[in-house]
Image (cartoon, rainbow, N blue to C red):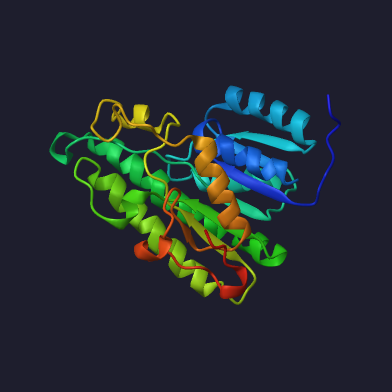
Amino acid sequence: MVETQSTGKTALITGASSGIGAALAHCFAADSYDVILAARGVAKMEALGTELSQKHAVKVEVIGVDLEVADGAHKLFGEVKHRGLTLDALVNNAGYAIYQEFKDCDLDAELKLMQINMATLVALTRLFLPDLLARKGGVLNVASLAAFQPGPMWAVYGATKAFVLSFSEALAEELSHDGVTVTALCPGITASGFEDRAGAQNSALVKGKRLPTADDVARVGYAAFQHGRRVVVPGVGTVSRLGVRRRSPSMGMNR
């Protein structure tokens, strides 16, 4: 077993029990960030934490929290501060989709989706922003390709991700002179368990398609975060056609 050691940099990753969140945890740990894993699946996160500690010699904190409820962000913030931790990076990855016609939807389920995809993301960003300003850190918000246009069967989900994209770009501009970066990662459907939870595993968007993996998406997202890019769409070579902008010419990453 590799002995863990503090690196001085800490990243909080929500929705870190599986999928893109777990893959992003590997990216940050490989770059010598200590990591805080936050989600409901404590057993999965503990297993991931052991793997990260052994492989990358970083410190790992695991926090079990429900971010679908209104006070989830405040509980997570309180626990992070109770442990005496200060963030250099905030990764708002927690979220999910519901693939269904809106007329057939469960209203409570859609409202919980809106809570975790939007309200919790905003709350965590505001609560931890003093840390990020003090440490000249960054935010990585996981949005979606669905943020760029309305999507039938994903009506509420697509709207929440359009919100995340708009919020991220506006905040990136506000903080551009404060040394804090904000990146929106906008993947398409990914082989990460996302499609199963959404109920879209048999849809034409998924069935029979070769989907990018969570690792593929995480690597692109992490590279964009490190280079200060405001928006990144994995798998899109000519990002300018989608209006993707860099934070500043000196920090941009050309692909």
Residue at the left extreme, as displayed: 103
Image quadrant where residue 134 sits: bottom right
Q: With respect to residue 10, does 189 lie above or below?
A: above
Q: Is residue 24 left or right of residue 33?
A: left
**Would residue 113 be visible to someone looking at this image?**
yes
Q: In terms of image quadrants, where is residue 133?
A: bottom right
- Dividing the image into 4 quarters, which one contains the N terminus? top right
In the rendered image, the residue lying farthest to the bottom is 177
Residue 249 at what x, y percent from top left? 57, 74
Q: Say left or right for 70 vs 254.
A: left
Residue 34 point in image, percent of width and height = 73, 43
Front residue (pair 41, 252):
252
Which residue occupies 38% across, 63% down? Answer: 166
Visible residue check, residue 15:
no
**Residue drawn where x is 61% and y is 68% of the image:** 251
Residue at (64% x, 54% y) in the render: 89
Residue at 35% over, 41% down: 113
118 versus 194 height, above or below: below
Q: Residue 66: x and y, percent?
A: 49, 36
Frontmost residue, 50 versus 223: 223
Image-based side of 148 in relation to 190, left or right? left
Q: How many marks?
A: 0
In x, y percent, where is residue 25? Answer: 62, 39
